[in-house]
């Protein structure tokens, strides 16, 4: 009997200490509980490389650039960059409607909605500070394309912030309703750029991934 492993990863950059992958939509970043949630970026990376740790995560329905450490040394160094905010991330999304302004910064504190996990909500009493820069790059009749730079990295931050703005991301099963939710069979959010310093050489890497929508 032939044993088949998990599907291969789409690797954008590979070194001895890390890989940068292009995660497809609807693939977990890390394994969940149960065999049915085993398939993920990290499961596939460990099947191919042995040691592999997620430096950061993308929501399951989000596609795009994800950084995976292949050594403990790289894992520590890269996670430090994310915690110290020396990395730069940019996303693109299609949102419902047209914002009144062409750009701005959303500064709304976020916290987990414990009764409706994993959903997050804006909470001025207990929420953690959260900021997102946004800019409209294309306007259509019922939707807009936006460029998003998360200043902080809270769970579901971009999705909740755009819902708060009144323009949810198309296809968002948690934060969009009606026509906005039904406008796409997938969440139209893609991690399109990631800049970070090589954990070994210190060279600045600037990765890009084409937006698939």
Image: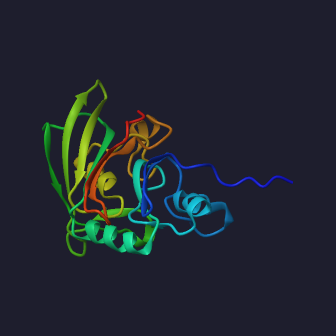
Report the coloring of the rendering.
rainbow
92 vs 129: above or below: above
Q: Quadrant of the N terminus?
A: bottom right
Quadrant assignment, res 192: top left
Q: What is the total number of numbered labels drawn onto the structure image?
A: 0
Q: Position of residue 166 (x, y in %)?
A: 25, 45
Quadrant assignment, res 33: bottom right
Residue for point 51% across, 64% down: 30
The outermost residue toward the top is 141
Q: Nearer the viewer, residue 33 or 73?
A: 73
Quadrant assignment, res 127: bottom left
31 vs 6: above or below: below
User: Does 163 sit left or right of 187 as displayed?
Assistant: left
Q: Position of residue 101 (x, y in %)?
A: 12, 38
The outermost residue toward the right is 1
Q: Nearer the viewer, residue 38 or 78?
A: 78
Residue for point 24% across, 75% down: 126
Q: Quadrant of the C terminus?
A: top left
Q: Position of residue 113 (x, y in %)?
A: 38, 68
Residue for point 42% across, 40% down: 178
Q: Position of residue 83 (x, y in %)?
A: 26, 70
């Amino acid at each position: 009997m032939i044993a088949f492993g998990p599907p291969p990863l789409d690797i954008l950059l590979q070194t001895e200490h890390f890989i940068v992958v292009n995660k497809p939509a609807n693939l977990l970043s890390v394994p969940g509980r149960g065999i049915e949630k085993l398939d993920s970026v990290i499961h596939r990376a460990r099947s191919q490389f042995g040691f592999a740790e997620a430096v950061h995560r993308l929501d399951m329905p989000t596609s795009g650039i994800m950084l995976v450490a292949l050594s403990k040394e790289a894992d520590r160094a890269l996670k430090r960059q994310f915690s110290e905010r020396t990395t730069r991330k940019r996303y693109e999304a299609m949102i419902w409607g047209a914002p009144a302004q062409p750009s701005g910064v959303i500064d709304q504190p976020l916290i987990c909605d414990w009764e409706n996990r994993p959903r997050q909500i804006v909470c001025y009493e207990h929420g953690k500070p959260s900021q997102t820069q946004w800019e409209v790059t294309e306007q259509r009749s019922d939707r807009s394309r936006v460029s998003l730079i998360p200043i902080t990295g809270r769970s579901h931050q971009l999705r909740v912030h755009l819902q708060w703005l009144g323009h949810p991301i198309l296809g968002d099963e948690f934060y969009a309703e009606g026509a906005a939710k039904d406008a796409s069979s997938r969440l139209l959010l893609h991690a399109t750029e990631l800049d970070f310093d090589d954990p070994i050489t210190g060279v600045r890497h600037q990765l890009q991934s084409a937006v698939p929508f």
